[in-house]
Image (cartoon, coloured by chain):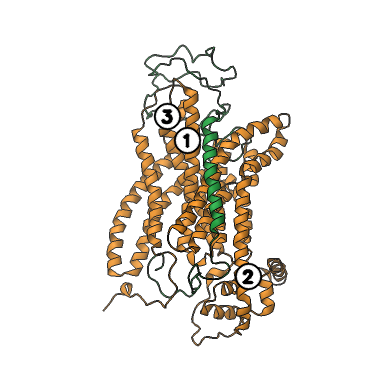
């Protein structure tokens, strides 16, 4: 008699998975983050001692904050637990115990990645009112990013998941790596005989390190969400949205950190700079570019093409961030000179101006990718519409087809339905339209029944036992 | 094969068209050329950013050379108070709001007995009147920085 765990139902024939080993890719991502942390730890242990009493060198002699100590303990324990789980996973895979395999894989990723959230939680918990204030503007940005998907939309929970990753794990990882660099770099690089040159190098490398690992932290989450939920991903647009959401999340934690710890004397200016001007133009754009590369790779065939698409997105993300961070101090000096007699004007007008100069080209790139992705979606829908309306299933009528291809008209209809039927009616309408769009985009057999069910029509197939795809809700 | 292992039939199906991810049709091809341009611009931005970062001076007005300092503070106590008059080759706008006394048991390695009220976290412990030197935390109403 076989146990329930060993029963593996035979799946029906389906197109080949675009990723043959998604679990291995996800594990690789988690191991890369762990390797980066371990390398930084080793560099820290091996760093030469700093013996100068110069005041500004105190930064390298600080004790480690409790949150970092806790992160280290959790990570070291997590590595040990992951090793044990790996052995269990190996045995379960050979025995064909599906449920155990799933639990082990989820647990391994959790113990390897979740400890990074400690640093971010410490920051957010240290300034809860500031965090709430920043959450309000972040929510507006998330809604805008979600709604920019004019046709096919990711489930809202995936956008929120990417946001949570950016705010907690992504930012925590970036904070930790920056702290490590701050502690070990001075020992290797400082030359007290020639402080100017060595500090210039140190600061440049600090920016490089901070920007690299913040982009890696954000991109890791986007890649994981795309891998796990790739059946909902249609390409560039989905990747871009998830990347932007991750960037908005990291931006929130960074803003709280700056307002509460780094520049506590200028909270209003920091909020204006980071949570208004920079909310959708800095972190969201950079990680959006990385996400677009991943989303495009999901649509590409296996091989070097996929790797080059991912690499393009990551290069743009890191390059944009580094250029932004190195240009901003120079531009800020010009801004101060330009608005020397009017500091408020310098903040209200000057900050958007310098942000536009430093980040503008990458914002344009992002918009070009978004436009290209939406046009490709529209082309597919337009080509599929006559076929579907002629099929006679009743899932999409010709009148509905015209509406589906017009985002403006759909928005007006949504407003009208919301006024008449409230939120419940609006949600049902969006679910129906998303199901219709998915049917047009990927005309799989059961989707017609799905749409007919939402319309209140009887299904066409003889055994209509398939549940409605919950993933297509708004 | 799903992410977490074999699973029952997926009622929502897959995003791929039946003829594969690169099948015929208006949209199925990823925007390779556009992504190549994006990647190229990113690489150029990395080079430019590194050039700017390694060649521009930080906001901290540092001298080219430092006068000789005691290598083990505490063993050779500093003059009474930290120097109140800066050496002549220092810039005149060098920040003076720095602490005037060092503890006599100032550690040479990483501290275990550091003052308990010492601020924690990097780089937030800079004195508020000291220009923040990191490119990711410029002074004033700072534009975006990369320091998380």
First-in-chain label (1 vs 2): 1
First-in-chain label (3 vs 2): 3
The answer to whether A407 appears left or right of A125 in the picture is right
Above or below residue A96? Residue A184 is above
Q: Chain A hue? A: orange
User: Where is residue A270 drawn, in percent x and y?
Assistant: 62, 40
The answer to whether A69 appears left or right of B18 in the picture is left
In this view, the residue in front, A236 or A75, is: A236
The residue indicated by pointer 3 is A189
Residue in view at x 57 percent, y 80 percent: A453
**Few, some or many residues within 10 Å of mark 3 (<14, 14–19, 20+):** some
- Which quadrant is home to the C terminus of chain A? bottom right
**Numbered disc in front, either 1 or 2:** 1
First-in-chain label (3 vs 1): 3
Q: Are marks 3 and 1 on the same chain?
A: yes
Residue in view at x 37 percent, y 51 percent: A31
Q: Are marks 3 and 2 on the same chain?
A: yes
User: Where is residue A13 drawn, in percent x and y?
Assistant: 42, 77
In this view, the residue in front, B147 or A71, is: B147
Residue in view at x 31 percent, y 69 percent: A97
Under tag 1, what secondary structure? helix
Above or below residue A254? Residue A448 is below
Chain letter tied to green: B
The residue indicated by pointer 2 is A430
Q: In the rendered structure, find residue A361 and report the number of the disc placed on it.
A: none
The residue indicated by pointer 1 is A205
User: Where is residue A15 drawn, in percent x and y?
Assistant: 45, 73
Query: Which chain is mark 3 on?
Result: A
Residue A120 visible (yes or no) = no
């Amino acid at each position: 008699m076989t146990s329930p765990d060993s029963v593996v139902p035979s799946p029906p024939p389906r197109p080949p998975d675009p990723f043959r080993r998604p679990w291995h890719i996800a594990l690789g991502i988690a191991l890369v983050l762990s390797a980066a942390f371990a390398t930084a730890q080793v560099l820290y242990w091996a760093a030469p001692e700093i013996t100068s009493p110069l005041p500004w060198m105190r930064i390298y002699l600080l004790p480690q904050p409790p949150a970092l100590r806790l992160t280290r303990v959790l990570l070291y324990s997590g590595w040990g637990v992951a090793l044990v789980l790996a052995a269990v996973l190996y045995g379960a895979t050979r025995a064909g115990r599906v449920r155990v395999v799933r639990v082990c894989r989820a647990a391994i990723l959790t113990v390897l990645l979740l400890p990074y959230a400690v640093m971010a939680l410490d920051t957010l918990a240290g300034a809860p009112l500031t965090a709430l204030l920043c959450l309000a503007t972040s929510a507006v940005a998330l809604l805008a990013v979600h709604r920019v998907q004019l046709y096919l939309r990711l489930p809202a929970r995936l956008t929120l998941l990417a946001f949570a990753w950016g705010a907690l794990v992504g930012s925590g990882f970036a904070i930790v790596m920056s702290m490590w660099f701050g502690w070990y770099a001075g020992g290797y690089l400082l030359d007290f005989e020639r402080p100017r040159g060595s500090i210039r190098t140190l600061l440049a490398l600090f920016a490089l390190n901070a920007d690299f690992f913040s982009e890696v932290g954000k991109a890791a989450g986007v890649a994981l969400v795309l891998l796990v939920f790739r059946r909902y991903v249609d390409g560039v647009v989905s990747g871009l949205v998830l990347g932007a959401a991750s960037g908005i999340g990291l931006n929130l934690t960074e803003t709280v950190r700056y307002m509460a710890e780094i520049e506590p004397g200028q909270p209003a200016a920091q909020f204006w700079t980071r949570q208004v001007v920079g909310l959708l133009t800095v972190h969201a754009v950079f990680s959006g570019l990385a996400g677009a590369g991943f989303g495009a790779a999901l649509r590409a065939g296996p091989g070097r093409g996929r790797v080059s698409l991912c690499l393009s997105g990551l290069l743009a993300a890191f390059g944009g961030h580094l250029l932004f961070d190195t240009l901003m101090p120079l531009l800020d000096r010009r801004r101060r000179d330009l608005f020397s007699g009017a500091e408020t004007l310098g903040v209200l007008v000057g900050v958007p101006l310098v942000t536009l100069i430093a980040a503008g080209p990458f914002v344009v790139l992002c918009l070009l990718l978004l436009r290209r992705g939406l046009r490709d979606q529209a082309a597919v829908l337009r080509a599929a519409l006559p076929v579907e309306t002629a099929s006679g299933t009743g899932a999409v009528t010709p009148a509905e087809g015209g509406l589906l291809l017009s985002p403006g008209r759909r928005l007006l209809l949504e407003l009208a339905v919301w006024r008449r039927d409230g939120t419940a009616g609006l949600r049902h309408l969006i679910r129906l339209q998303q199901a219709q769009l998915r049917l047009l985009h990927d005309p799989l057999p059961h989707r017609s029944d799905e749409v007919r069910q939402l319309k209140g029509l009887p299904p066409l197939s003889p055994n209509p036992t398939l549940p409605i795809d919950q993933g297509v809700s708004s | 094969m799903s992410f977490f292992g074999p699973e029952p039939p997926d009622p929502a199906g897959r995003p791929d068209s039946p003829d594969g991810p690169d099948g015929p049709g208006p949209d199925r091809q990823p925007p390779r050329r556009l992504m190549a341009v994006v990647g190229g611009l990113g690489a150029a931005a990395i080079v430019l950013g590194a050039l700017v970062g390694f060649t521009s001076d930080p906001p901290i007005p540092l001298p080219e050379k430092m006068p000789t300092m005691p290598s083990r503070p505490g063993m050779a106590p500093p003059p009474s108070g930290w120097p109140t008059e800066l050496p002549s080759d220092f810039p005149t706008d060098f920040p003076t709001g720095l602490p005037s006394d060092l503890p006599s048991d100032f550690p040479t390695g990483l501290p275990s007995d550091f003052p308990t009220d010492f601020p924690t976290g990097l780089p937030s412990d800079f004195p508020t009147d000291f220009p923040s030197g990191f490119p990711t935390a410029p002074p004033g109403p700072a534009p975006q920085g990369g320091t998380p």
